[in-house]
Image (cartoon, rainbow, N blue to C red):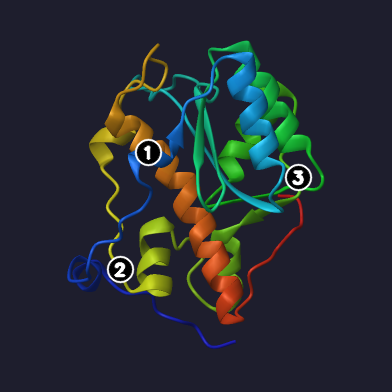
Amino acid sequence: MARLNPPDKTTILGLPPYAGIAPAQIAVPTTAAELDDAWDDLRAHRHIGFDTESKPTFVSGQATRPPDVAQFATPERAYVLQLRHSGCVDLLRSLLAAPEITKVGFDLKQDQALLGQHLGVVAAPLIDLDRVFHQQGYPRSVGIKTAVAIVFGQRFVKSKKITTTNWAASRLDERQLQYAANDAFVALQVHLALGRTGRPAADTGQR
C-alpha cells in the first residue's frame, strides 16, 4: 500500500474552521432520570463516539490518574459523564460492555488501559480511528485534527490550555464541556464520513 502524507500544520491552519458540536447539543446527566434518558438514546445507535479526560499530573513519576470524565456522542448529541457520580460510572460500565454498541474514537489504547485498571472493564467492540487511517496508508498516529482536515477539508481547533484544566472539578465550565463533547462527537462524524465515502470505516477488533 502506498504511503499517504497527511496535510502539514501550515496547510491545516489555512483551512476554514470546523464547527463541531453546539452547546445546546451537550448534556451532563447526573440524576437517575437523566442517566436513563442518556442510556436510552445512546443504545439506540450502532456506533457512538467515545473518549475520556483525566486531571493532569504535573509531578514527575506520579502515576496517571483514572479518567475523571467520559464522553459519548450520537450524530445529534453528546453526553459528558462526570465519574465522581456513581450513577455515571454505572452508565459508563454498561456502555463500554454493551456488545451491540461499537465505541469509536482516536488513540484509545491509553483509555482502554486506564479503564481496565481502575474499573475492570474493557470497551468492546471498539474502533480506533488512528488504526483505521493507518490501514489506509497514513502514518500510525493521525489524530483528530489531521483527520478532520483529511476528511472534511476543514480546521478543527483543540485548545491545549483546556486539555490541562482540572477535569476532576465538581462543575465543569462551558469550555471544558465543549472540548470533551467534541472529542467524542467529531470522532463519530469522521467515522460516519469515512463510511459514506466508501473508504474503510470499521476495525471492530478489541484493542
Asked whether the viewer can see residue 184, the reply is: yes
Q: Viewer-nearest of labels 1 and 2?
A: 1
User: How dense is the environment of label 1, judged by Cα within 10 Å: few (below 14), some, or many (20 and up)?
Assistant: few
Which of pointers 1 and 2 lies earlier in the amino acid sequence? Answer: 1
Which of pointers 3 and 1 lies earlier in the amino acid sequence? Answer: 1
Which of pointers 3 and 2 lies earlier in the amino acid sequence? Answer: 3
The residue where tag 2 is placed is 154
Q: What residue type is labelled 2?
A: Gln
The residue where tag 3 is placed is 124
Q: What residue type is labelled 3?
A: Ala
Asked whether the viewer can see residue 64, the reply is: no
Quick one: SS at disc 1? helix
Question: Where residue 35 sits in the image (x, y, percent)?
Answer: 62, 23
The residue where tag 1 is placed is 24
Q: Which of 30 and 117 is in front in this view?
A: 30
| Vertical side of 46 occupied by 14: above or below | below
Q: Give the residue at x 53% y 23%.
A: 29
Q: Which amino acid does label 1 sit on?
A: Ala
Q: CB of mark 3 within 8 Å of CB of mark 2?
A: no
Q: How far apart are marks 3 and 2 (CA)?
A: 30 Å
| Vertical side of 180 occupied by 56: above or below | above
Query: For residue 173, which numbered disc appears in the image?
Result: none
Q: Give the residue at x 37% y 32%.
A: 177
